[in-house]
Image: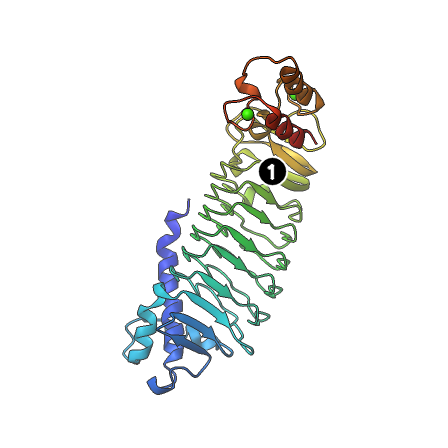
Amino acid sequence: MCTQFVKNAVTACAAAFAALSLCAGAVSAEEYDGGFFVFDDEKMSLTITGAIPDSIFDYNDVFDKRQTQAQRMLNNSKGKIKTLTAAEGAAAPSNCGSLFYGFSGLTSVDLSKLDTSSVTNMSNMFGECASLTAIDLSSFDTSKVTDMSEMFSGCTSLERAELTGFDTSKVKRSYRMFCECSSLKSLDLKGFTSGAAVSMNSMFDGCTSLVSLDISGLGTPDPGMMSYFFEDCISLESLTLPKGFTVKADMSLPNTAGWKGGSSEGSVSGDGEYAEFVSEGGEYLSLAAVMKYDLNGDGIVNRADLYAVAHHLMNRKAYKAAYDLNSDDKTDIKDVIIEKLNVM
Ligand SMILES: [Ca+2]
Ligand SMILES: [Ca+2]
C-alpha cells in the first residue's frame, strides 16, 4: 500500500533536504561549522545547534547555483549520515515535513534537546531511515502537530519506538505513519488519541513483525477513515483496544482463527479473512496464537489444558506432538512449565 506514495515522498524529501543544505550555506564555507547545525563529514554526524529557520523551505532546488561546495557535500552525504543529535538551544521549524527523510545510514538519534513546541507538520519526518533500529522521541512536544502522516514510513529496521509522550490531540492525518516498519515488534500508543483525526488509513500497514499493539487511547474514530489500518500485521497476537472501537473488515486485521477478548470466553470474530467486531475494551488475543495452548480444543486456555499435559506425563505416556509446546521433540516438564505460563 505504501509504494504509490513513494514518488511524492521522494520529491518532498529532495525539497526538504535541499532547503536544509541551502541554509547551511547561508554562511560561507569557512563558517561551515557555525549557524544552526554542524556537519562533520568524517564522523558523518549532524548536530543541530540552534533554531532551524522556517525559511528552510524557501529554496528547494537541489541544483540551485547559489549552493556552495559545502552545501553540495552535505546534500550528497545525506544517505551516509550515521548520527543525528541536538545540542542545547536547538529548535525545529514549524514545518518538519521530510526533514530527515532518506537518512538511510542513520543508526543513532538523540533529539532530546530539540524544541519542537512550534512544529505543526511532522509528515515523513523520518521516512525511509532504513538503518535506524531504535528511536526515543518521548521528549517531543507535539501539542501543535496536525500532520504525522508517513512519519516513520519505510523505517524497515526500526524495532523500538518510544513515543509515549506524544500529544496527538490536534493530529488530523496519521495515515501510513508506521507503514512498512517491518521490524517493529511492539508499540505502546495508549496515549495516542484520535479526536481531530480525518485520515488514519494504512497506519500500521506492513508492520509484519508487530506482535503486540496498545491503542487503548484511540477512542472511537470513524472506521471509514481507517482502511487497511492493520494490513499485513500478520504476527499480531495481542491488541489492546478502547471500548466501542469498531474493527471492520476493510481495516484488514488478519483473522486466521479469530480473536477473543481477554475477559470473554468465546471468540469475538468469525473465521473470515479479516476480523470484524466491536470492542468492549481491554486486551484481545489472536486465537491462532492462543490455540497452541488449548490442548483439549475447547477454545479456552485454562487449567484443564495444564492438567492434560501433566496427566500425560504422570502416566508415562509416549511422545505426543501437540503437547510438545517448546518444540524440542520431547514431552517433559518443560512443556508443563510453558503451559502453566500461558494458563496463568
Ligand atoms: Ca482448553
Ligand atoms: Ca517439549
Q: In x, y percent, where is residue 94?
A: 52, 70
Q: Residue at x 38, y 59 (%)?
A: 104
As drawn, 7 above or below 61: above
- Within the displayed image, which quadrant is ligand 1 positioned in? top right
Answer yes or no: disc 1 within 8 Å of ligand 1. no
Instruction: Give the colour scheme of this rendering.
Output: rainbow
Residue at the spot of label 1? 238
State the image coordinates of residue 134 (x, y, percent, origin top left): 50, 56
At mark 1, the secondary structure is: strand
Visible in this render: residue 14? no
Note whether residue 96 is visible.
yes
Tell me if 285 is positioned left or right of 177 in this view: right
Q: Quadrant of residue 295?
A: top right
The image shows residue 155, relative to residue 242, as above or below, that is: below
Quadrant containing the C terminus in the rendered view: top right
Question: In terms of depth relative to the viewer, which is nearer, 320 or 106?
Answer: 320
Q: Amino acid at mark 1?
A: Ser
Please state if 233 lies on the left or on the right of 244 as rendered. left
Q: Position of residue 294 (x, y in %)?
A: 62, 22
Which quadrant of the rendered structure holds the N terminus?
top left
